[in-house]
Amino acid sequence: MEAPGVSGGSFSLRRFFSMLKTEKLGRDIFYYHRASSTNLVLKHMARAGVVDEGAVVLAETQTMGRGRLDREWFSPPGGLWFSVLLRTRRPDSLIPHAAGVAVVLSIRKMGLESVIKWPNDVLVGGKKLAGILTEVGDWGVVVGIGINANVDTAAFPPDVRERSTTLLEITCVPVDREKLLADVLLELEKEYNLLVGGGEEGKERLLEKWIALTDTIGRYVVVLTPMGEVRGRAVAIDPSGALVVETPDGGIKKVAVGDCLYLR
Ligand code: BTN
């Protein structure tokens, strides 16, 4: 019998490897039925020096799943909760953007119209399908990605259910999580290589892709930042990935961290 909230059975590493086309990402994968947080586990491993570039930690459920701005991230069975280690010496502020592009391209490959909402939320039909939490240390960068894949929305608390969606809810059939993970890792590897190996031109190309996939630019927004609210029209992102907002008095503000709400 399936566990509540899960659909489609447990993850098959054999099927995953049969579909993985990356050079590095995901070649070394650590699979847990239950983990505290895949980011936490991978950070410990990276700090201890027992894993290398591309290592992935994947968990069926997380007991302490974490989101941006220190929020809790609900991680019931059926989701795709994983973290990837990038051992770059020069962490780039655009790595989360590379991950956002990778997730949206992979979801679009499934025929679903997904978009990025600044900074890197992945939405379908205006509801959140996936989130990205990037953490940096002297050991490298851990990119944590949570995709609400085969999750029954009943598994979410009411407030999360209201603003979130899942692939199961959208497609009404369990999706192939092994294929989805293999796709996301391949797209992430491409974007990451562009970022670290493509110089200024590579960064520009990544930003162009991000802009083509977002529905934030041009919107009237309120951005809740640790320093207060910024209201206005989102007009661009700058080369560091910060959101550029034109305020009602005609001024320009750049926001690096925060939560973006659409006003209309
Ligand atoms: C967000 O707030 O939108 C980011 C959510 C990131 C969730 C993922 S799930 C895998 C990884 N492990 C965590 O604890 N968080 C990230």
Image (cartoon, rainbow, N blue to C red):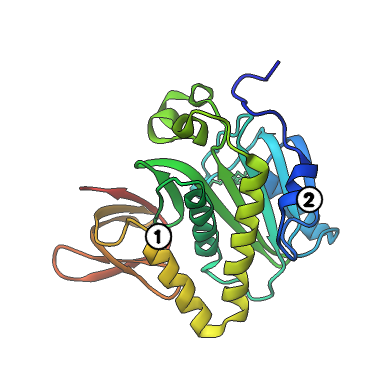
The residue carrying pointer 1 sits among few (fewer than 14), some (14 to 19) or many (20 or more) residues within 10 Å by Cα, namely some
* Residue at point 64%, 76% (across, down): 90
Looking at the image, which is closer to me, 202 or 239?
202
> In the image as oriented, which residue stretches furthest toward the top?
1
The residue type indicated by label 1 comes to: Leu
Place residue 5 in its image quadrant: top right
Residue 149 placement (x, y as % from top left):
56, 37
Place residue 43 in its image quadrant: bottom right
Residue 221 placement (x, y as % from top left):
26, 54
Looking at the image, which is closer to me, 45 or 264?
264
Q: Quadrant of the N terminus?
A: top right
Q: Which residue is mark 1?
A: 213
* Residue at point 64%, 40% (across, down): 177
Give residue 29's mark. 2
Q: Is residue 199 above or below residue 185?
A: below
Q: Earlier in the sequence, mark 2 or mark 1?
A: 2
Q: Secondary structure at mark 2?
A: strand
Q: Is residue 24 above or below residue 18?
A: below
- On the question of residue 143 being in view, the answer is no
> In the image as oriented, which residue stretches furthest toward the left?
249
